[in-house]
């Protein structure tokens, strides 16, 4: 069934597109590797691979990004603190307090 609108035609997610281009990148590098092993050249094609890899790295970082970005920097309220959970602190008694 054909989609009426362009937004319905493009139903692949960004992650799926990234994985697809990453598989293509690895396949391209494998072919270059085989050409170099056989002695047929392929050194010029490595420059394309480096540029393509840098672009993929930026796209991957923009999609997945830093894992720490989603977590808040302040402590969660649900997590018990040392005073609420565990062994209590020992009192700091001094000799003059015991008299």
Image: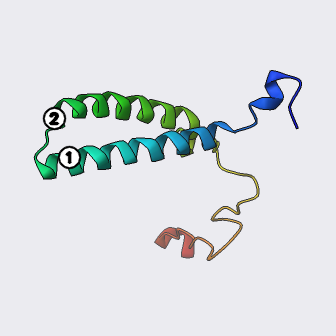
Horizontally, residue 54 falls left or right of residue 60, namely left
Q: Nearer the viewer, residue 91 or 17?
A: 17
Point out the frontmost of discs 2 and 1: 1
Q: CA distance from mark 2 to mark 1?
A: 9 Å
Judge left or right: residue 43 versus residue 8: left
Instruction: Give the x, y percent position of residue 30.
Output: 31, 50
State whether residue 69 appears in this view: no
Residue in the picture at 54% in, 32% down: 62
Of labels 2 and 1, earlier in sequence is: 1
Measured as percent of width and height from the top left, residue 54 is found at 36, 31
Residue 42 vs residue 85, the one in the foreground: 42
Q: How is the image coloured?
A: rainbow
- Residue 75 in view (yes/no): yes
**Which residue in the structure is indicated by mark 1?**
35
Which label was assigned to residue 43? 2
Q: Quadrant of the N terminus?
A: top right
Helix, strand or loop at mark 2: helix
Label 1 crowding class (10 Å Cα cut-off): few <14, some 14-19, many 20+?
some
Say above or below: 55 vs 83. above
Q: Quadrant of the C terminus?
A: bottom right
**Percent position of residue 98, x then y:** 55, 76
Residue 44: give x, y in percent of width and height. Answer: 18, 29
Q: Quadrant of residue 58?
A: top left
Identify the secondary structure beneath mark 1: helix
């Amino acid at each position: 069934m054909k989609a009426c609108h362009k937004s319905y035609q493009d139903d692949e997610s960004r992650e799926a597109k990234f994985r697809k281009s990453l598989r293509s990148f690895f396949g391209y590098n494998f072919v270059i590797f085989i050409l170099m092993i056989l002695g047929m050249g392929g050194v010029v094609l490595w420059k394309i691979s480096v540029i393509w890899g840098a672009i993929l790295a930026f796209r991957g970082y923009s999609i997945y990004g830093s894992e720490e970005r989603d977590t808040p920097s302040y402590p969660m309220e649900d997590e018990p603190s040392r005073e609420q959970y565990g062994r209590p602190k020992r009192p700091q008694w001094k000799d003059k307090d015991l008299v």
